[in-house]
Image (spheres, helix red, strand yellow):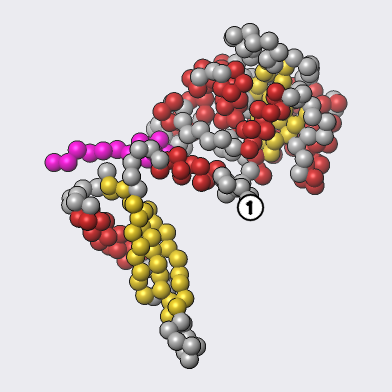
Amino acid sequence: MLELKINSHVTRMNRHLPFTTSGDQIFEEYQKDTDTLDIETRAQSYLLHAVESCAQLIILTGDAGHGKTHLCRRLLEKHFSYSPSKARELLLNCCDGTMKIKDENSVPNKKSLRIHKDLSELEISEATKFIDGITLDDDSVTIICANEGRLRAVISQGSSDISTGIRDVFAGSFDTGLCTLDGRLHIINLNFQSVAGTEGERKSILGSAIKKWAEDGGKWRFSLVSRSGTSLPLDKLNSFLRRWSTALLRLNGKPGGRLILFFCSSQKHKEHSRNRSTLDRERRIILFYRVI
């Protein structure tokens, strides 16, 4: 009997589902190091550059799950050279906006960080009071994570110069695309982060994630299947994939084995002769697979 093998990536993704018993892994500060999928992004590079420049206050905003807490964890690792487990420990215990996180190695001119990992946990009145009471200095950077809707509500009630500054940068960012006006106050809106990247970029979040998942030491293959017709009905999809899975396992000398399989399809128009105005349609299906 073949030994059952569990794909580690599938297990990791399962722990990110909010309705499972192990759903705590959906929160960055509770994740395990083995579940970590670290990808370099432009938002991360911008955040680190701002901290190491003249920034005094940085607002990370966006919808829930867009990676605000993840960026804070990555910043703690990069800025202080902390391990992922040390950074998560700090997220749990030292990131309510009241404590300064300093470099344990006492590196000269290394700015300390004051992080509030989730302003949305506070009532609007309390969050407004927190922002209005922020004291900025040149030796530390205050970083606040807030869902965009809550941020709008909070700064609309603020009366301090800081609240006014945040309102000005936030409102102007939708017209100018700028994250800062003076280099001291930055707003990084993750709602404008594209997983596909922009034209001319060689890397994207989606592409990097797939690349990291695929390049884990295993070997992926692909097979091209052509069939006539315009579609593959859903009621026939299961039998189609089962038939080809059996054929691919036999082809790779592993009959009765198991494989990871995903596919994509495209439709190709093919004209048989110049005298014919009608076109035949051909469905091309690419099967990517890996024997496990």
Residue at coordinates 38% horizontally, 37% vertically from top-left?
216
Q: Position of residue 238 (x, y in %)?
A: 31, 60
Q: Position of residue 222 (x, y in %)?
A: 35, 55
Residue at coordinates 51% horizontally, 33% vertically from top-left?
38
Q: Badge 1: few (under 14), some or many (20 or more) residues near its Cα, within 10 Å? A: few
Question: Where is 100 relative to 65, above or below?
Answer: above
**Residue 11 is inside the magenta segment:** yes
Residue at coordinates 57% horizontally, 25% vertically from top-left?
73
The residue sitting at the left extreme is 1
Q: Position of residue 121 (x, y in %)?
A: 63, 27
Residue 105 found in image quarter: top right
Residue 111 found in image quarter: top right
- Horizontally, residue 268 falls left or right of residue 42, namely left
**Disc 1: which residue:** 199
Of the 4 image quadrants, the one containing the C terminus is top left
Magenta stretch bounds: 1-13
- Mark 1 secondary-structure assignment: loop
Question: Where is 176 relative to 20, above or below?
Answer: below
